[in-house]
Amino acid sequence: KDQSVGKCHCASDGKVLVTFFRQPQEKNFAHVLVHETAHGFLHRYRAPVSIASWLNEGLADTIASEMVPGQDDWDYAYKQAPANLRKAGSLGMGFFTSRQIEGDQYPYACLMTRWLIRSNAKLYVQLINSVKDGVSVEESLKRVYRTDYAGLAAAFGQSLGIRNLRP
């Protein structure tokens, strides 16, 4: 059952429709509005090419959490994410390859996005541009970061003090 409070519907012709339910808490509503709008912007950026879920959700959540700070639910999830990753030893089933990441993977995608941007914003933009130019995410990672999913997961894990984090 879909329990989302907002959705961004993207079409191959570049059309975007953002829908959401009004939330009683102003910050939650603002977060959803910014998050879904970020999806729409990313879809329209350069070309209406679909972006892998972990990249798309990671960027949308990063933008929303930075523009609408101080949300208890999101703050708690992000603070718990490193401990959850340490315990699991993995980003979870299909993190890099599934059509849509799971709800509990959103904090991982957001933390990874923040780490990539803070490490080198220009390389992150090159990664997004490469994917938007039609290159697969896996090939874009090889070209831009000279790594694959396993290498990216391990490097991200090391940034959190987690040895041998698996995809």
Image (cartoon, rainbow, N blue to C red):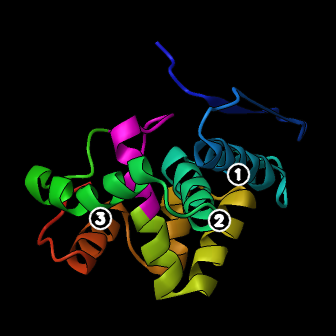
Residue named by callout 3: 153
Q: Please report whichever mark, 3 or 1, sits nearer to the chain's N-terminal start.
A: 1
Q: Residues within 10 Å of mark 3 (few under 14, many from 20)?
A: many
Q: CA distance from mark 1 to mark 2?
A: 8 Å
Q: Which mark is residue 8?
A: none
Can residue 95 be seen here? The reply is: no
- Residue appearing at x 28%, y 76% in the figure: 155
Residue nearest the viewer, comparing 60 with 142 = 60
Q: Which residues are magenta?
A: 94-110
The C terminus, quarter of image: bottom left
Residues at badges 3 and 2 in contact (C-beta under 8 Å)? no
Residues at badges 3 and 1 in contact (C-beta under 8 Å)? no
Asked if residue 100 is among those painted magenta in the image, a careful observer would answer: yes
Residues at badges 1 and 2 in contact (C-beta under 8 Å)? yes
Q: Please report whichever mark, 3 or 2, sits nearer to the chain's N-terminal start.
A: 2
Check disc 2 and give the amino acid type. Answer: Met
Q: CA distance from mark 3 to mark 2?
A: 26 Å
Secondary structure of the residue carrying tag 1 is helix
Check disc 3 and give the amino acid type. Answer: Ala
Residue named by callout 2: 67
Q: Which mark is residue 34?
A: 1
Q: Nearer the viewer, mark 3 or mark 2?
A: 2
Percent position (x, y) of residue 5? Answer: 60, 28
Asked if residue 32 is among those painted magenta in the image, a careful observer would answer: no
Percent position (x, y) of residue 114? Answer: 48, 72
- Residue appearing at x 13%, y 55% in the figure: 89
Check disc 1 and give the amino acid type. Answer: Val
- Residue appearing at x 22%, y 63% in the figure: 82
